[in-house]
Amino acid sequence: MRRRAVDDSMAVCLLARTTPADVLNLTGPTATGLLTRLAAGPLSLSDIDTLPDNQLPEAYFSLQTLWGRRAIELRDRMHDPLLALTATVTGQALDLAAVTSGGRWKLSRFAYVHRDDGALQVESPRAFSLVRLLSPGAMSLLACFDQPVDSAAARERFKESSEAHWKNALHLLRAAAVIVECNEEGDSNEDLQPDLLQWSFHDLLFHHRSRQGRHELPLGADFRFRGKLAHEPVVKTNPWRARAIVLDKPDPASVAMRDPNFTQVLETRRSIRAHNALYPITRQQLGEFLFRSGRVRYRFHTELGEFSSRPYPSGGASYELELYLTINQCQGLERGFYYYDAQEHTLCLVEHANADTEELLNEAWVSAAKLCRPQVLITIASRFHRVNWKYSGMAYAAQLKNTGVLYQTLYLVATAMNLAGCGLGLGNTERFCRLAKTNYYEEGSVGEFMLGNPA
Ligand SMILES: Cc1cc2nc3c(=O)[nH]c(=O)nc-3n(C[C@H](O)[C@H](O)[C@H](O)COP(=O)(O)O)c2cc1C
């Protein structure tokens, strides 16, 4: 269908990343001519529309193909463009359908502006494309939609644009889900549809970015900092070694004799939120528990560096997780905040009981519906860069998965030992960092587990 030639028509622009493979099957005379013109610079759609009728299908097929291969971007106008729409996933259809210039719009609560490769872009985890902001005026355009606004009223605030240009800008922002249409009350589908309503901005962005499907950014083990930054060592350098308390190591044969069988452990495992204040957990039990769930079994070298083996699995054998114990009530151990040295199987006093350790215990009590102020609170911390160094896009997701794996191991060992264990969903990282004296960006808490003798 012939598009009407207008001033301020949208323009297409060949992207620098385009490779010969992207244009491989575009060999017809119209396609070749189009590619030659695109190679020389942006081309307006109204220019393309001046082609003879019999060449238009091939021209638009070529544009569709180039868009599907992420080889072109779409601009709101030929000269002084504000915006450029680019696909984030290959194989998408280019939507050039006319947009009404009416309607009521607002910025999506999932949209965010950030700097990428030296340029600003606005994007949303809901879309298969994003918008690059090509000039400072683009920010003023976005600001028009900070509140639900009728298109005509927003245009009033953006007077310098022609009707055609306004339509194009709306089209690009809508295509990238940067703006969403809303009703008279100002609600969009993001406020009304249960599938969208229940997502918070940061959760959806994390989900989007750490999984494949809606972007083609680096994802997975690409060793992005190899040769640039030192890799976190296989075990933490223990600054509290001088205050180490040697823990008991259980005898594997007697453990095997007294343990319930695996099915019993699985079937009887429960979250237990009541601890026996008269018979608190003992230092010996704690030693066995930590040995069976968290110790370093052995270390080994590969061409990728040094690794360890532990009782629980860990993505990439990274073993970035560290255990810190807040001892509230334990026979044979002073109250305080301890580091578990998984290599040496020792507990090292980091801080005597203080206001922060009391608050950690209080916060656990609140998390556990005020049913239990634990005898022992195990805080799981991650040495983030042990994983961040190696993985793109999914590094933090991997650490949370590893944390879940460790939770289950703690649960199963607690059950086998007839101890009361309960995972917690919340913890205060700032408080943890203050106690453990870690840099928030290097090592922070990612999980909590309560342990004690069952009431
Ligand atoms: C990741 C995770 C977080 C949890 N967070 C909490 C919590 O904050 N407070 C709590 O009382 N229980 C928490 N639990 C325990 C669950 O409530 C419990 O596993 C669930 O109710 C099933 O009961 P069960 O473990 O006894 O089979 C958590 C469990 C997991 C695995």
Image: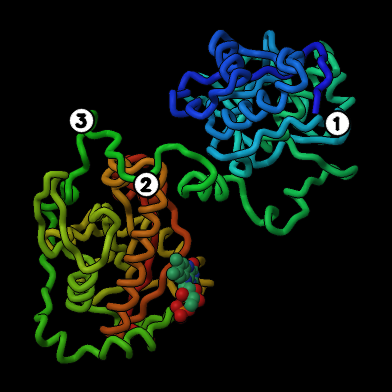
Q: CA distance from mark 1 to mark 2?
A: 42 Å
Picture colour scheme: rainbow
Quarter of the rendering occupied by the N terminus: top right
Is the residue 105 above or below the residue 395 in the image?
above
Residue on which disc 3 sits: 227
Amino acid at circle 3: Gly
- Location of residue 407 by image quarter: bottom left
Specify whether 25 is left or right of 81: left
Which residue is labeled 1 in the image? 100
Query: Crowdedness of circle 3 by 10 Å Cα count: few (<14), some, many (20+)?
Result: few
From the image, state whether disc 1 or disc 2 is nearer to you. 1
Query: Mark 2: which secondary structure?
Result: helix
**Observer able to see residue 37:** yes
Residue 37: which disc?
none
What is the CA distance from the residue labelled 2 to the residue labelled 3?
18 Å
In this view, 131 is above or below 319: above
From the top left corner, tell me how far across and down residue 418 is, in percent. 30, 86
User: Residue type at mark 1?
Assistant: Thr
Question: Could you give the CA–CA distance between mark 1 and mark 3, rounded to whole angstroms?
Answer: 53 Å
Q: Residues within 10 Å of mark 1 (few under 14, many from 20)?
A: few
Q: Is residue 113 visible?
A: no
Disc 1 to disc 3: CB gap under 8 Å? no
In percent of the image, x 37 and y 41: which residue is there? 392
Q: Which comes sooner in the sequence, label 1 or label 3?
A: 1
Q: Earlier in the sequence, mark 1 or mark 2?
A: 1
Residue closer to the observer: 70 or 430: 70
In the picture provided, is 279 more to the left or to the right than 343?
right
Report which residue position mark 2 lands on.
395
